[in-house]
Image (spheres, coloured by chain):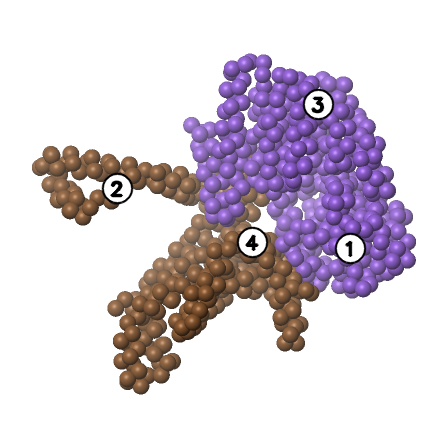
Chain colours: A brown, B purple
Amino acid sequence: MSVLPDIDNREANRVGMMKLTSQKRRRKKWNSEALAGYLFLTPNIIGFLSFTAVPVLVSLILSFYDWEMLIPPIFVGLENFKNLFLNDPLFYQVIKNTLYYVGVYVPFNIVAAMILALWLCSITKGVAIYRTLFFLPVLAPTVAAAFIWKYMFEPNIGFVNTFLGWFGIAGPNWLGDTKYAMLAIIIMSVWKMVGYNMVIFIAGIHSIPASLYEAAKIDGANSWNRFVYITLPMLSPALFFAVVMTIITSFQVFDQAYIMTAGGPANATNTIVMYIYESGFQFFKMGYASSIAWVLFGVIFTVTMIQMKVQKKWVNYD
Amino acid sequence: MKKLWKKVSAVSLAVSLSILTACGGGGSTPSNTSGGTTEQAQEKKAEQVQLRWMMWTGSDEEKKVWETLAAKVTEKYPEITVKFETDSFPNYWDKLQTQVASGSAPDIISMQSLRMPTFATRGALEPLNPFIEKSPEFKIENFDGSILEALSWDGKVMAIPYDLGPYILYYNKDLFDKYGVPYPDENMDWAGFLEKAKATTQDGNYGFVMRNVIDQVVPWIWANGGNYMNEEKTKSMIHEKEAAEAIQFLSDLMHKHKVTMPITDPGNDTFYREQFYAGKVAMYLDGPWNFGNVRAKANFKWDIATIPQGKGEINSWVAGSGFGINPKSKHKEEAWKAISVMMGEEGFEYLATTGRAFPARSTAIETFKKADERPANMEDVSKAALKAKPFAVTTNWQETQLMINRELDKVWFNNAPVQEVLDNIQKQMDPLLDKHQKTLSSSK
């Protein structure tokens, strides 16, 4: 049994809606069908309301309260936001750390995914195997992957420094050095997530008509030109999607940093979401945590809106 | 209506935050239902009472120990059953906080001394003095004074302690033997400690390892006659001379003498312990609560001693955990009965045979020693307790200590100038202490 009404019925519904006041019979039919539709939606709506809509709303309200959980909330107006912006150096530090993460991770990820995708589209043998191998880390739980990478980053016997040693490079104390800790987390994150964008790009490249490349070849375009003038513009919708999604998720970075360094050393890997978690669940400052969460929402919203505006200049939907 | 709002917001916020952080800890619905069953059970049979007791555990063996203890309550009082609920140590606190907020906390609450003020000032723990006074047979005088004090707030006992934990020095006997270095003892001062640490830093082994947290630093600050905040908890003292000297000494151990193992895994809470278990480190500081782990994991001869002497009278802090009563419980009398069985002499005898934690009740110490002969210098725990005072904390200690820890990281990881870092800590600590004072005055 199909959950969705078929096309004809939908058309009938539309007509029915237009003539709602004049034709009672149709109205009745529409009502019962709509009811069925809503009934089918109910589990989803309940889930959405109780686990998304209500908590989101509550957190917005709470951001104007001082709430330590154990005693009733006290209304403080904009106090939380004022403290956040005026009296909290740690807030600026976590913003800085998160921006650093986003700023390095996103380009790194997109470029690596693009290179892998182009390479996989150019070879003929073993494509399925390589594609699976590169995608596998995406499926692995972040926590497990973070633990493995912790051992890889161990400075004395870990793989990363052993590898660097082969080239005569003395690797740093990756996770115990404020200069390298965030970089280590970025490297791990790229390894973890590059397969996801790679798959999107592969799908995008495969949907580019071969005739375009043939025509370009006849006109004498070399492979670089074919990439810049055909692949990139034709891939721009996929690229846009990948960039937007990667930026949004990377602003919310938490698990890797929490497992690998717990925000340390000296706050070098403390991120916005980790600060939300700490403020709420460790410092008993639920209202404050909510206000940081809404600032994060504002940041992501603004960045995404800018991207939506700018996309008109570079994304090609033809 | 107000209550409903509180419940809804507590649960939904916990859910939303745990989704956001992908760290599912907070869900409080199961406990709500079990709270319901307690009520139903009570309605059915007025004299039968089921109590809920929540306690953190790290293994199935631990769980069995506590469940056996809970069963002893029913043996003595057939009308009382204690339902044991558990979670890992970090999750326990998220859970307890959510349950207290939504009014569904268990009847018997397990409490650690370092976190007790946070809960006590917010009215989440019942003062136990009236119960203790009514029960002379409980013999509260058998408990170690320092740990009772650590679990008291405003002069009132908030939880009955099951373990006594003064910070002590663990050492690897095999490493000391290998390099012909005399074992540490209670007369060892800082110079002696440095000498031993230097002598055991050989062949890739290190003399000392520490964790980058304030808990590890406080014994040194006290031993040097300083403090991290004043007794009134209104002003930071960590930037003053005595404290700064102590931290400089630790910094020198790491950067100048290079006898402290560098921390390569700052996200790992047990990094320092693992290095000791692996036999790579001669000495480290920890509490007696870690006997069990060292017994199981150290493949070498080891022992304990008191922490190196300084010019101060105190050189160790004491912490421990115990069991308190939820002020909103409908069965406070029964909860006290249950606690008095579990923490009574017999209960302690049983706990001591399992060798789980150094007993807070002196009567059980002999049994505890018999359960496992390691460490040989067991009496040093009691000696350390004599020179220890409770680890003083504030109502917002979680936030304060994390700030301190992360600032001190600059000393441990970047070899930053000590005084500069400490001045920076003071700047941030004083407002946090103000906030603590505000919380105190509003709770009265």
Can residue B247 be seen?
A: no
Number of callouts: 4
Foreground tag (2 vs 1): 2
Residue lying furthest top in this view? B46
Q: Regarding mark 3 in the picture, which secondary structure is present there?
A: helix
Q: Amino acid at mark 1?
A: Gly
Foreground tag (3 vs 4): 4
Drawn side of residue A135 relative to residue B263, left or right: left
Q: Are marks 2 and 3 on the same chain?
A: no
In the picture of the structure, the residue carrying the numbered disc 1 is B279
In the picture shown, does residue B47 fall above or below B272? Answer: above
Residue B397: where, in percent of width, then height? Answer: 64, 43
Drawn side of residue A192 relative to residue B134, left or right: left
In the picture of the structure, the residue carrying the numbered disc 4 is A144
Q: Amino acid at mark 3?
A: Val
Quadrant housing the N terminus of chain B: top left
| 10 Å crowding of disc 4: few (<14), some (14-19), many (20+) | few
Q: Are marks 4 and 1 in contact (CB under 8 Å)?
A: no
In the picture of the structure, the residue carrying the numbered disc 2 is A1
Q: Regarding mark 1 in the picture, which secondary structure is present there?
A: loop
Q: CA distance from mark 3 to mark 4?
A: 42 Å
Quadrant housing the C terminus of chain B: top right
In the picture shown, does residue A60 fall above or below B197? Answer: above
Q: Are marks 2 and 1 in contact (CB under 8 Å)?
A: no
Q: Chain of mark 1?
A: B
Q: Chain of mark 2?
A: A
The front one of B52 and B227 is: B52
In the picture shown, does residue B384 fall above or below A226? Answer: above
